[in-house]
Amino acid sequence: MSADALRDHLAAFGLSEKEIEAYLAVLKAGTATTGEVSRAADVSQGYVYDIAAALADRGLVTVDETRSPTVLRARRPEDAIGALSTRVEELGDTIDDLYEQPADEGAPVEVVHSRATVRKRARSALEAARHEALLVVPAPEIDHLREALTEAQDRGVFVYLLAVSPLSADPLDVEWGRIADVVRTWEATAPVYVLVDETRGLMGSHGVLSGRHGEEYALAFSQREVGSGFFGNVVANFWPMGEDRYVTEPDPLPATYDHLRTAATNAALHRAAGRDLLADVTLSDLDGSEQSYERVPVVEVRQGLVGDPTNDFPMENSLVFETPDGRVSAGNTQGGIRPFYEGYGATAVTLYSG
């Protein structure tokens, strides 16, 4: 990084021009007296003490006033960077506390032509995932997304991955359980999809991430209705074509979910293993009224993302409960489209072995 670039970055952290020159003088020398700093920053000897205090407050230098003249010492790079990072985190926490999410989250679609930018948008979407991610990507792209996928899993995000052509051996020689919960492969040049929480992600032609990149492009989006439309397209037309390569073990019971589709997938895996299930569930109807039930039997799991499909149409992912008020079917409340077939959404589900 050039000295000018470093000056720009330090200025972004709020350092004045004189503070930057003073810090660079100390940084290059390791230690510098107040007189040396005064000459380097072209400021009076008296003002150097104000600058020294400001730099010390930012965690960039230490000030030794036991020496005469006073000596400024540059802190180790990792310590200085750590101090700046702490300020960024504090700033982020403050912004997060004050932020009021707008009803409209911004421009719905961005056209992206650069492969590097497509990869960046894919990683950015995964970094924002809270509940689930559904991907259709060429197998070699897995390596570019590996870190973001691993971090998403570590946060508890449930990942569905369809790896498509080219399916050479090397890209598929991975520890699937570290990057995804359900993995399928399909020898086809399907379009690229990265869909996160049905609210954001990207969709593009296969060539935008595979082979020689030409005129192909992708659409990056951050709007719920767009995300739900793409999600429905994937689960209807591409996901069923894949061949199972890896399926995670279901979560140990009891397990609590605030995302119904993840609960349904885990319930399907438990039932496939021969387990009966009970549930505590909080349901919300289309008017927003809530009703809770405790330890009611789960009598049906209707889904098509793992194992043999049990749903009537691709978008159906629901649990059916035997309640004191009769059988109730509940869909997912997260994402762009509220339950329209079931009539109820499950805002919280805890599964137990029955």
Image (spheres, rainbow, N blue to C red):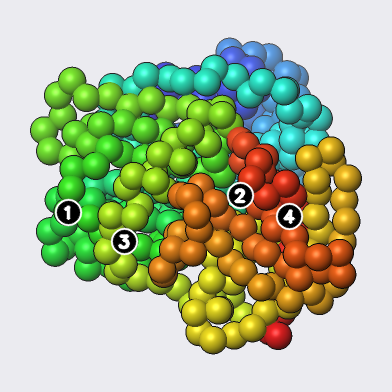
Look at the image and tell me whether residue 87 can be seen: no
User: What residue does disc 3 label?
Assistant: 184
SS at circle 2: loop
- Which quadrant of the figure has residue 117? top left
Label located before the other in sequence (4 or 2): 2
Q: Give yes or no for contact between labels 1 and 2 (Cβ–Cβ under 8 Å).
A: no
Badge nearest the viewer, 1 or 2: 1
Does 243 sit above or below residue 11?
A: below
User: What residue does disc 2 label?
Assistant: 130
Label located before the other in sequence (3 or 2): 2
Q: Give yes or no for contact between labels 3 and 2 (Cβ–Cβ under 8 Å).
A: no
Does 108 sit above or below residue 170?
A: above
Disc 1 from disc 3: Cα separation: 10 Å
Q: Give yes or no for contact between labels 4 and 3 (Cβ–Cβ under 8 Å).
A: no
SS at circle 3: strand
Question: Amino acid type of disc 1?
Answer: Glu
Disc 3 from disc 2: Cα separation: 22 Å
The residue that appears at 87% across and 70% down in the rendered structure is: 324
Residue 253 falls left or right of residue 136: right
Badge nearest the viewer, 4 or 1: 4
Q: Nearer the viewer, residue 52 or 320?
A: 320
Q: Nearer the viewer, residue 95 or 235?
A: 235
